[in-house]
Amino acid sequence: MVHDPKLWMSLAVFVYFFSVSGAMHNIIRKMPMFMGDRNEPGKMVYFYQGSGMQLGAEGFAIGFLYSVVGMILAFVTHVLVRVKNVGVQRGVMFVAMVVAYWAVRKVIYLDNWKTGYSIHAFLPSGW
């Protein structure tokens, strides 16, 4: 069992997800996964707007998006390079880039929504 690479890969993905999702922060600070909405008592809130608090579901959503990008990078660098057909490589790489772009864009959107700060690229004034 100790020599099984699939076990180690699964454990590595779990540790990565646990790290990027902020699960340790949620455990230490005893953060709830969700909470009731103050304006509508029957409604649940999974994303809390404002930088003062993070709910557990929010961290897991961001951790999932980070894990998607990490798994795409691992697949492209370890599996896709062994495919002989260049057309298949290009097609899968295009899909991988689109999915990774979507995931990173969602993370940036949620960060902008939560904090109110926008992330923008720096372009030199000569351009």
Image (cartoon, rainbow, N blue to C red):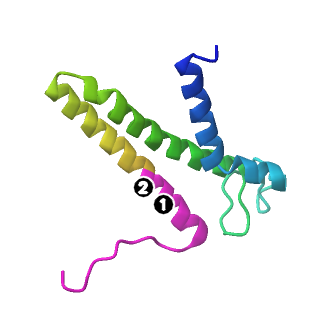
Q: How many marks?
A: 2
Residue projecting furthest to the front: 3
Q: CA distance from mark 1 to mark 2?
A: 6 Å
**Which residue extends farthest top?**
1
Q: Is 122 colored magenta in this rendering?
A: yes
Left or right: residue 90 compared with residue 36? left
Residue behind mark 1: 109
Give the residue at x 54% y 20%.
6
In the rendered image, which quarter contains the N terminus? top right
Q: Amino acid at mark 1?
A: Tyr
Left or right? Give the position of 83 relative to 25: left
How dense is the environment of label 2, judged by Cα within 10 Å: few (below 14), some, or many (20 and up)? few
Question: Element under label 1?
Answer: helix
Q: Residue at x 64, y 18 (%)?
A: 2
In the drawing, what numbered circle is on residue 105? 2
Residue at the farthest bottom position:
125
Could you say which quadrant of the image residue 115 lies in? Answer: bottom right
Q: Residues within 10 Å of mark 1 (few under 14, many from 20)?
A: few
Q: Name which residue type carries label 2.
A: Arg
Task: Please state which of residues 4 and 116 is positioned toward the viewer in this rendering.
Answer: 4
Q: Is residue 63 above or below residue 119?
A: above
- Left or right of residue 8: residue 33: right
The reply to whether discs 1 and 2 touch (Cβ–Cβ < 8 Å) is yes
Q: Which mark is residue 51?
A: none
Q: Residue at x 58, y 34 (%)?
A: 12
Which portion, as a residue range, is magenta?
Answer: 104-127
